[in-house]
Image (cartoon, helix red, strand yellow):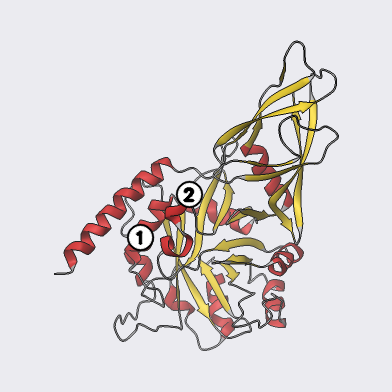
């Protein structure tokens, strides 16, 4: 009796997902390149999540994601009496079976090695067999994941269940993993938290910067999608859309995190994304005025908080303003004399390149 409404809900969710996928492009990229959206840390009822794997696929379609990883807890199985499954790949199998030929969304296999601190919780994605990662000790599973060619990262290093002060720090075990190239990335964003300390660790130890939803319930409920919110995502800079290209980019640290109204990442990659998404048109002057007019377009799905730091002033706005997502505004600049070109330096206040550091970027207007 209950299967009909659930089936109808799934079909409706799937239809909405295809519409969103067709319409959604989060960040523009240079020709021949892509910023692919990923969520590499999600859960279903096959560990401690609240939904079937099909819902995770339908959510990702609806939200326009390019790639998700099914990352069930290996050791923590609170639903095992109701859903016994000796094959730890089962969640991935069910999810990947839903993907249709030619579909934008890709699903990859992963697992969460679930331990007390140290090392805490460790994700391995692009694995071949989750069952081979299930061991009594903490190290062997991580080593087995690396033998499978997996990309391995540290989950929520600031989690207050493991860090009473909420501060991410390395233990000797983590240093051992990094030194032996067994740990490749670290979450600086997990669910609703952003860790400046984890970002500092990533930059210092050349770990890939990651942001994930770690979703257990519904993404709509957790992130207010119906009101314009979004889950935390990791964007990877790639030259093709294959899963292998994503994997290679992760190992090469080619990532930027989108969290609420922030983008977070290495300075060079944040600058690249900004240059690809903020465009200044050719300026013009009225014949009898020394006021330069120029249209500024934001091609991305993120509104940018702009602080002008140069010598000029604006005619109709202050030096701090919002450049709305997927929109254009006009700047009127008091250049005093008619100029063929000018440089406009900005600090982008929601582009984070380090703890309490924000991107400074100069645009050439000509």
25 left or right, relative to 279: left
Q: Quadrant of the C terminus?
A: top right
Q: Residue at x 31, y 54 (%)?
A: 13
Q: Residue at x 67, y 77 (%)?
A: 166
| Pointer 1 with pointer 2, Cβ within 8 A | no
Question: Is residue 357 depicted above or below 131 in this figure?
Answer: above
The image position of residue 260, as x and y in percent, is 57, 56
The image position of residue 67, as x and y in percent, is 46, 55
Residue lying furthest left: 1
Dot 1: what SS?
A: helix
How many numbered discs sit on the rendered protein? 2
Res 169 visible: yes
Q: CA distance from mark 1 to mark 2?
A: 15 Å
Disc nearer the start of the sequence (1/2):
1
Res 31 visible: no
Quickly name the residue at label 2.
242
Dot 2: what SS?
A: loop
Q: Quadrant of the N terminus?
A: bottom left
Quickly name the residue at label 1.
96
Residue lying furthest front: 316
């Amino acid at each position: 009796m209950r299967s009909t409404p659930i089936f109808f809900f799934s079909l409706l969710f799937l239809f909405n997902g295809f519409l969103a996928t067709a319409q959604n492009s989060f960040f523009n990229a240079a020709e021949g390149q892509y910023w692919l959206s990923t969520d590499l840390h999600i859960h279903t009822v096959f560990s401690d999540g609240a939904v079937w794997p099909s819902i995770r696929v339908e959510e990702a379609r609806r939200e326009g994601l390019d790639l998700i990883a099914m990352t069930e807890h290996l050791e923590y199985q609170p639903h095992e009496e109701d859903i016994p499954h000796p094959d730890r790949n089962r969640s991935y199998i069910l999810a990947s079976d839903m993907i249709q030929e030619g579909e934008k969304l890709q699903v990859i296999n992963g697992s969460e090695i679930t331990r007390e601190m140290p090392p805490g919780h460790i994700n391995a994605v692009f694995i071949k067999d989750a069952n081979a990662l299930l061991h009594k000790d903490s190290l062997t599973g991580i080593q087995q994941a690396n033998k499978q060619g997996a990309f391995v990262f540290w989950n929520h290093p600031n989690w207050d269940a493991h860090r009473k002060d909420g501060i991410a720090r390395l233990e000797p075990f983590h240093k051992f993993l990094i030194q032996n190239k067994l740990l490749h990335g670290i979450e600086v964003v997990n669910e609703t938290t952003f860790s400046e300390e984890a970002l500092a660790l990533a930059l210092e130890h050349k770990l890939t910067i990651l942001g994930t939803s770690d979703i257990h319930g519904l993404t709509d409920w957790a992130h207010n999608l119906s009101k314009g919110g979004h889950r935390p995502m990791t964007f990877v800079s790639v030259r093709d859309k294959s899963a292998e290209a994503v994997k290679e980019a992760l190992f090469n640290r080619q990532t930027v995190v989108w969290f609420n109204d922030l983008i977070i990442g290495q300075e060079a990659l944040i600058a690249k994304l900004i240059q690809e998404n903020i465009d200044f048109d050719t300026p013009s002057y009225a014949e009898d005025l020394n006021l330069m007019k120029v249209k500024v377009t934001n091609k991305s799905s993120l509104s940018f908080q702009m602080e002008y730091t140069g010598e000029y002033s604006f005619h109709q706005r202050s030096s701090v303003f919002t450049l709305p997502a997927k929109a254009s505004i006009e700047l009127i600049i008091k250049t005093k004399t008619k100029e063929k070109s000018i440089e406009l330096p900005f600090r982008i206040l929601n582009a984070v390149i380090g703890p309490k550091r924000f991107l400074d970027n100069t645009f050439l207007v000509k």
